[in-house]
Amino acid sequence: MEDKILETAGAVYHYTISDNGVSITGYEGKRSELFLPSYIEGIPVKAIEKKVFFNKSGLCRIYLPETIESIGDWAFSHCKDLEEIYLKRKYYALGKALFGECPKLSCICLLDAKKMEPDMSITPEEKGFGTLLAAVCGILDAPYLFQTQSIDDAEWLSLWDARMLTVLSRDDMEGYTKLLLCGEEDYGSRENNLDFFLEQKRRRKVRLAFLRLLHDKGLADDNRKMLTEYLLSHTKGEESEETWLVLKEEHGEDMVYLSLFTDLGCVSLENISDILTDLGDTNPQMKAYFMRYKEEYLGTVDFFAGLSLD
C-alpha cells in the first residue's frame, strides 16, 4: 500500500488506504493537543498502527475520533508528557503496552455519543472513571483491566479493587533482592538504597489510596476504612511520612487533595506545627490553607506563624 502524507496545522500524518479504511502509520509534530482526523480523502480513519506516537515529547492531550476501531502495539508508549486521552466508549481491537512508560498519564476518558471538539464538556463522573482507567496502565500495572466498554459497572470496579488490594498487601521489601542480584541499578546508586526503595513502594501505595478515595464509586466500607488507615499511618509525625510527602510534593496546590488529607484526619494538634515548619517559606498557598485549618478546626491560633506569610 502506498504511504501518503497529510499536512495540517502543526501536524503531519503518514497514512495508508485499504478496503478497511485509513490507517495512521506515522506522526510528526510539536502540538501539545491533538485531534486526530475522522476522515482523510473522504474515507474513515479506522486504525492507529503500532508506535505511531511512540516517544513523542510535548504531546499532552489526544482526542481520537469515533471512527477508530483498532490501536496497535506501543501506539502511545514512552510519551513522557502525555496526560490525557479521550476516545469513544466502544469495543476496540487493542495492541499491547499502549501506554507503557507514560508517567504523567492521569486520565483515559471514555465518552458516550459526544463529538470530539475542544469545547466539549466532561462530567466529573466521566473524569473520575477516566482516572481509574489510567491507573490500570500505570500504578496498578493491570493491562487485563483495560476495557473500553464496561469501566463503570460493578464487576469492573470490583476487579479494580481486587487488584488494588493485591498491590497494597504486598510486602514493601518485595523485589529488592531481585533488584540487587540482577544488577538492574548501579551498585551504590540511590535507586538500590533500601530506604529509598521502601519509600518508593509506600509512595505508590499512598497514591493508590488517595486515588481510590477521591473516586470512590462502589468502594466498600471495609476497603474505605483500610485505605484511610493506611494514609493515616504514613502522615506527618509517623515513623514514615509518605502520605505527607506525596501530598506536599505532588499535590500541594490541589484543593481536592488538601481537603481529603484534612477530612481523613491526617492533620492534628500533634502534627500541625511540624507540618507548618516543614513547609517553611515554600508553598505559601498550602501553608495558608493549613494555618486556616489550624485556627478554624483545631481551635488554636499561632500569631507568630501568621507573620511568616508576610
Image (cartoon, rainbow, N blue to C red):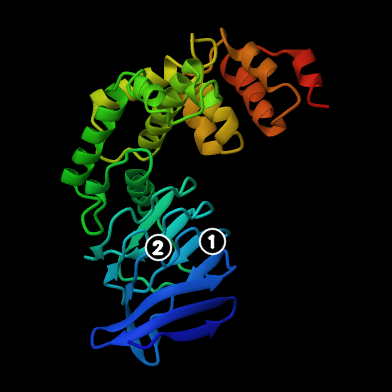
Asked whether residue 47 appears in the rendered view, the answer is: yes
In the image, what residue occupies the spot 50% across and 26% down?
191
First reached walking from the N terminus: tag 2 or tag 1:
1
215 relative position to 106: left or right: left
Q: Tell me the residue that label 2 is attached to.
A: 86
Q: Quadrant of the C terminus?
A: top right
Q: Secondary structure at mark 1?
A: loop
Amino acid on which the number 2 mark rests in the picture: Tyr
Picture quarter with the N terminus: bottom left
Image position of 290 (left or right of 157) = right
Residue farthest along the bottom direction in this orientation: 41
Counting from the top left corner in percent of width and height, residue 87 is at: 35, 65
Q: Which residue is mark 1?
A: 59
Residue type highlighted by circle 1: Leu
Rendering quarter of residue 206 = top left
- Please identify, in this view, whether the residue under mark 2 or under mark 1 is nearer the observer: 1
- Residue 15 higher or lower than 277, as above or below: below
Q: How many marks?
A: 2
